[in-house]
Amino acid sequence: MHMKKLTYIIVAAAAMIAPAAFGASQRSPHVGALAPYSYPENRAPRPDIAFMPDGTSYAERSADNRKIVIKDIATGKEKEVLFDLDRTRETTLPAFDGFIVSPDASKVLVWTGVESIYRRSFTAQYYVYEVRSRLLKPLSKTHARQRDPLFSPDSRMVAFVAPDNNIYIAKLDYETEVAATTDGAARSVINGAADWTYEEEFATTSLMAWAPDNLTFCYVRFDESAVPTYSLPVYEGTCDRRTEYALYPGEMSYKYPVAGQPNSTVSLLSYDIETRKTKTVDIPGSPCYIPRIAYGPKPSQLMVATLNRDQNRYEIFAVNPKSTVSRSVYTEDSKAWIEPEAYEALHFGENSFVVAGSSEGYTRFYEYSYSGAKIKALTPAHCDATAYYGTDALGNHYFQTASPTPMDRTVQRLDRKGITSAVSKTAGTSGATFAPGCNFMLLSFSDITTPPTYTINRADGKQVSVLLDNKDYADRTASMLGKKEFFTFTSGGYELNGYMVKPRDFSASRRYPVIMSQYSGPGSQSVLNSWSLDWEAYFASQGYIVMCVDGRGTGGRGTEFRTAVYKDLGNLETVDQVAAARYAASLPYVDAARIGIYGWSFGGYEALMCASADDCPYAAAVAIAPVTDWRYYDTVYTERYMLTPQQNERGYNDASALLRALHLSCPLLMMYGTADDNVHPANTLQYVSTLQSLGMMCDMFVFPNMNHSINGCNARAVVYAKMLQFFDSKLK
């Protein structure tokens, strides 16, 4: 106790002697300079529109977040004001954060007061606006906050999930509210909304569906009572200060299943609107996961996508919610894992549905009848299909592919004669959002030299109007960019794609330090012909060459290339990243003794693996929010690629950065947020503990109360400034 008092006195005295000098000496000049290169300041503007149900107009939110205007798609001319906070009756708001137009366009849901739950989910205060009467009223009189509201097809009802984890149905005509469920409970039962793993790994926040006749409402129930609870400390902090924790920390607790541990038990239920009775629907085989539910064209066709725990068997059932009879209409078995596109790209039309499969060497979209008969393949056999948009009245199908190279994204059409043609530029990255009916689309485009542009186009690709050309943004950022170019080299018999960002004043007669940037996670791609303004450009201005390579396991290259890492994460990825460093070292303008590696999340994990590789070529490594042992990460993601630790103990051991810590052979900086609900701080802390036990050390910087993204309160700029400071000290 006495020693602690003495230490406090010394520290306090030092602070009193020269606080200003100390602060000045520690303040990086790069933090302010990096802000324009960091999220959110580096984002290019994008239009905020939503296509209307008629397929001939779109709704656009005003810049002051107070008005929604309807414009004609073909002409771009304003047709009417759909919503105006200056003209609402009964309720007034200073502004709104977002909106949803009802299926018949008679009502608008607006919300304000957003409070995040996890990465995608949030609660807010929702209001219903009657277009004809201009009445604006709270969605619920009994629940101050709601999440995941869903209009019924006739626009007369809205289902939502309340903070008590129950589903309520607001009957708008009568201004009444009915509890569809009553068993919801915190950290126990969730009705309709997704649990943490579904939100993070299945990219959905809710699993609810209305029948086309408005008489049945179906949902997935999560029983997470057997899932272990994870707790993270919460401190007072200075960004969004939590004064209640000024003296003692608080706690954020939630259910998080790590690999091999129990998942939420999911069940499918149907609720009868008229009788208010609930039925449980038994799915054959009792699947572990239900990543999607959606209705086909008939009330008797609830389509349910299912996965086994190993995620190598995918099955779609057509369910009659009234009789609870289920019928299998599609099955795919994989030697590795089922690609997320299989359920993310599901599309249910009037006479058929579209699903993604990867059994023929590439991810392709296929059309099936509701009886389960395969009709045809919709996408080419030589490239990965990456998004499905829909079909028009003539039977043309619209989709996106990783073509003509894996680094590009092209919007294409398959016509009734079976001819595939591009309806966007083929070089660069194009993506689309189609209006109902698929006669028009919002088309986005960018490449490595062109910031995103947004145009309204006809389905055949002909441009109708320019919504946003981002010329001002392009002019403002032109001087910030480095020289970005693509390259290829060979590793393990594969030609790998990469890019490098050179200083604007690059000279081939100089020898530059290099930072290898990578993510490397399965199915991901970092090397894309698309716009990016990030820390790489700033680091290039500071005399670095930044290089990035997509090694084996990454996406856009077909099934064999992607699944080469199955049950063996961290092995081939490391081989390829080490080979990339050796390729960099062979270039005449690179100093082979000054090559570093950086990564975030999976990329942080891979940075650790590379820094401990045999004959490591790196002089320094930075790992941000890294996984350090796959036993610490969630079930859905980890087991998709590794199975469980019980099934694949050797694979988990070989993939553990902890078990390779002894071989760490270069200086290391680790950073993380203390409120990271995704990759828990325990990953970094256990790695540091391992180093400590071995008599080894690393540098570390911690961001209190920050999550996996480390955003807000200058945090992202500080991340990059700290990284630059570290690399400067080791590579210059």
Image (cartoon, rainbow, N blue to C red):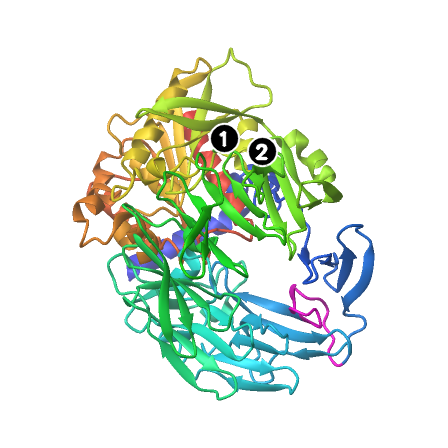
Q: How many marks?
A: 2
Whether residue 119 is visible, yes or no, is: yes
Residue closest to the eye, 433 or 602: 433
Answer with left or right where residue 504 lies relative to residue 606. Answer: right
Q: Residues within 10 Å of mark 2 (few under 14, many from 20)?
A: many
Quarter of the rendering occupied by the N terminus: bottom left
Residue at 51%, 34% in the rendered image: 403
Q: Secondary structure at mark 1?
A: loop
Answer with left or right where residue 94 lies relative to residue 220. Answer: right
Whether residue 700 is visible, yes or no, is: no
In the rendered image, the residue lying farthest to the front is: 417
Residue closest to the eye, 368 or 611: 368
Q: State which mark lies toward you, 2 or 1.
A: 1
In the rendered image, the residue lying farthest to the top is: 509
Q: Which residues are magenta?
A: 90-108
Identify which amino acid the numbered label 2 is placed on. Gly
Name the image quarter holding residue 466. top right
Q: Which residue is mark 1?
A: 405
Marks 2 and 1, how far apart at CA:
9 Å
Q: Which mark is residue 428?
A: 2
- Residue 106 falls within the magenta-colored stretch: yes
